[in-house]
Amino acid sequence: MGARGKPSQFLGYWGQGDRTETLRSLVPHYCIRQGKMSGANAQLEWAIASASLLKADTVTLNACGRSQPTDLPGDAWAAVEARQLRLGRDPFGRVPLYWMQLGETIWFSTRLQLLLPLIASPQVSPIALHSVACFSYVPTPLTSIEQIASVAAGTEMIWQVADVNDMPFPKVRSLPSAWQESPQLLRREDEAIEQLRVLLRQAIDRQVADLPIDEPVGVLLSGGIDSSLVTALLVEAGLQVRAYALDFGVEGYSELPYAQQVADFLQIPLVRVAATGDAVVRAIGATAKALDLPYGDGTTAPLFLLKQAAAQDVRVVFNGENGDQLFAGWTNKPLIANGVYTKEHPATAETFEQQYLRTFQRFLGYESQIFSPELFAQIQAHDLSFYLQEALDAKACSSLLARLRRASLMLKGAQNIQPRATALGFAHGLWVRSPFCDPDLTAWTFQLPGELLLQGACEKYILKRASDRWLPPEIVWREKRGMGVPLKVWYYRELWGAIGQRLNPNVLRSENRWQPYLADAMLSGRLGVAMRDRYIGNNLWLLLMWQAWRTEVLKEIPVKRSFDHVFWLPPAIGQRIWNYRRRLD
């Protein structure tokens, strides 16, 4: 499915028995392709539903353009051949893919919500909830529902049945990936810069190959080096580019001056999208539904609003995601320092996995204080480092920086940033394209030595050197900030009432997954100063999004709200109560 028309999901089954009526009831407007195969003792049946089916027995969903230098069918695919079912995802993880087994039938879909009606009583996974609390996303192969699993990015799951009465667990095959450090490193800076410039242009050419030159495209422009470079390359390629930037309406959090500077330099229009506290509050429910799985990052609702605005003008939007993952962005320096310390003091230091877990800056270490006693008992032995092992495998990369970049690609990129970017775009009928998700470019970056990526305090050094041909120096060399969403400001203003409703003590008490007074404990400081000051923004948002997900997606109905909290009072009075309580303590 190319860029013409709107993106759609696919849903299908494979196994014993005809399930097409059930399939048709779930997606009545989708086209269905079906077939039969003879088994040893029974007949094997399959059907796949999609808005736009290919004639072959393979359905692909391609979110970022079909002209990729890879033999993979697309970003996610389902293929039926030779009495075999294959479900796969490309290594960048842009499109999720879920599956479940009901009796002797495998059901699969690119959207979790299409599978939920098949389950009489969906059960929330305590292990997945613990993972969300510590990662802000559900790591593969888990999903938030016990009965549903996910296909990991960069893998293909294969069911091959000799006897359909004995449905085996699938074989998992890792797809070829070049996310391994090259034995020969490219150390000449001038040569590396020229090669990178060529690769960047080629990545853009592949991404725009199927787009009409006279049709406008959007770009989500923050004013940072990654999105600014993508914008400049799109303009150089001759496309009609419209840029979209967030306006939070809070002084000190705005990146708008930089985005405007880039737009003026490139002579393209910049659309400022209001993402005020009130607008974000109104978007919480729709954002949770669009994301499909619970994601706890505070940028999700603002990005939902940004893509909603872009969808009024364009069908394709580009972003700068994955630039940090490829070129050793800002999260790596603390881990590099810790890695050096570990070598010097191996007996006293944390393990590398423990160090990496702390980079997520969520609820790690607070489990007994945030979860209900019943849920804490279920997750107490849950080892989160299990989900890091493959990504942090030292055999793939000998140097620390290459190892960190591989992990960032496989964890924070493929399991978090990329799938939610696609989901938020699909919710508005947008194709989302990430030029930094390019196989050739990615493989090339693993030829780079650390000194071309991180020079002193300068991150992404080689990318900045390559970018100075296309962008003004003030944009190229300014210090990295990241998207600063003013959540902490909004909690004492626009989000105050939403906290009182969605994180109401009676709601949390009846859910029996969280401590009932968790929001009060965080904002008052009783959970610790770090949780109140440093981590309060995204972590309180994570709780709000979980509640929105379970009501909007899982359809759990909250009970009547209680008034045994301060959030029904004005924020100033609530803060005075907390101050008085601290003096008593």
Image: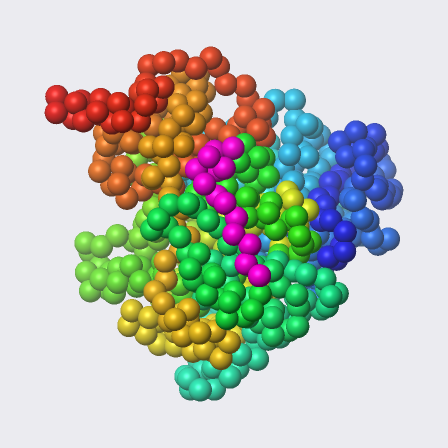
Residue pictured at 76% horizontal, 56% vertical: 4
Image vertical order of residue 72 relative to residue 22, above or below:
below
Which range of residues does the magenta coloring cover? 269-282
Q: Position of residue 508 (x, y in %)?
A: 41, 21
Which residue occupies the foreground of this view, 480 or 270? 270
Which quadrant is home to the N terminus? bottom right
Rendered location of residue 454, percent (x, y) = 35, 71
Which residue is at 20% across, 64% downward? 344
Indicate yes or no whether the magenta region holds residue 278.
Answer: yes
Residue 405 in view of the camera: no
- Residue 101, given in percent of the width and then of the height, sits at 67, 35
Report the front residue among 175 and 39: 175
Q: Quadrant of residue 502?
A: top left
Q: Is residue 188 left or right of residue 92?
A: left
In depth, the one of 150 and 5 nearer the eye is 5
103 relative to 393, above or below: above
